Amino acid sequence: MSKSIDAARKNVLRESSEVSGVKVEGYNFDNGVNYEKIISSFASTGFQATNFAKAISITNKMINDKAFIYLGYTSNLVSSGLRDIIRYLVQNKKVNLIVSTAGGIEEDIIKCLGDFIMGDFRANGSELRSKGINRIGNIFVPNSRYMKFEDFFQPLLKEINEEQKKSGTVFTPSDIIWKMGEKINNPKSICYWAYKNKIRIYCPALTDGAIGDNIYFFKFKNPDFKVDISEDIKNINEETMSVKKSGVLILGSGIIKHHILNTNMMRNGADYAVYINTAQEFDGSDAGALPEEAVSWGKITPKGESVKVFGDATILFPILVAESFAKKNN
């Protein structure tokens, strides 16, 4: 029995080598509340706090290296208050190119036409439906907002169609978004500032959502109406090939993540990459893929600096912006 105990003890108390590196420790509240130091303490806290600290560091390196910055975000983030954070970045020319989903475009415009209201994740769907209220998580959007969007967008499609007939040039999705930014003429809008500052917004899935619904309705009366997606992929890829340093900042996943990474493959990968999302990689989808997978495709350079933070962008992104783009020296 004593031999068994000795063996067990040896297994449990196995000899080890010393490890050098940063000591794990969190913020000391004995020193009071200092938000800047709380955030800087994330680097030595461990888990996603340390990954988030790395995300802040890489973002600052993108900025200091004067990288061409690609910002990608999914539509739900524009549904949320992050729309105002993104608007700040575009208004102040902190990013160079945007990729979003159709919802990320239309909801920016719709918020200029009527407010979204805080609701409840557990609200009864049948009740909301009977009242014509759409739910996006815990955010409520009365259907009247989409009716106002139709009133805004249908005349714009008519104008585009007439212009196309005269010139023979077919508009791309980014051209349509450009026009939306011009027409909305509202400084609260991301699209407005993108138009003013000549920052292209690409949307590889423009026919989704309310934009798609409106194109569908318009197409019935105007069967000759066309949208040229091929010119957009040509333009985004050619612009990327001329970039000296590339930085990607991707909030959420899906098509916006893949579109940004795929265009960076044309230059043998981005130099800096920050992902913030909650997707897992076990199903093999690019949505949850870690940066190392992108390296294997040539979407991030082998020597590039990258990190994925598993977390909610509505919490993390305002802090990241505060610690990078919004700093006085940036």
Image (cartoon, grey):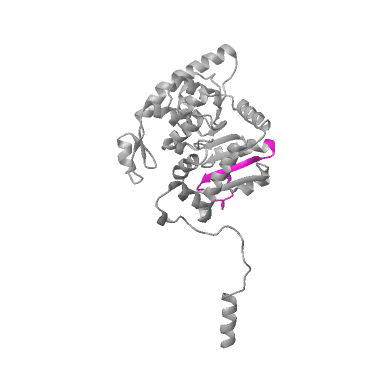
Depth check: give the residue in front, 220 or 301.
301
224 left or right of 84?
Answer: right
Quadrant for residue 200, please give it. Answer: top right
**Extreme residue toward the front, this view:** 31
Quadrant for residue 266, please give it. Answer: top right
Q: Is residue 252 magenta?
A: no
299 left or right of 279?
Answer: right
Which region of the structure is painted magenta?
266-287
Spot occupied by residue 90 in the image (x, y as percentages of width and height): 51, 30
- Does the image show residue 9? yes
Quadrant for residue 4, please give it. Answer: bottom right
Q: How many numbered badges does the structure rendering display?
A: 0
Residue ID at (54%, 40%): 250
Residue ID at (56%, 75%): 12
175 left or right of 140?
Answer: right
Quadrant containing the N terminus is bottom right
Spot occupied by residue 185 in the image (x, y as percentages of width and height): 44, 21
Task: Examine the rendered structure and indicate whether residue 113 appears above or below residue 25.
Answer: above
**Extreme residue toward the top, this view:** 166
Q: Is residue 283 magenta?
A: yes
Spot occupied by residue 56 in the image (x, y as percentages of width and height): 54, 44
Quadrant containing the C terminus is top right
Spot occupied by residue 302 in the image (x, y as percentages of width and height): 68, 46
Depth check: give the residue in front, 288 or 166.
288
- Does the image show residue 287? no
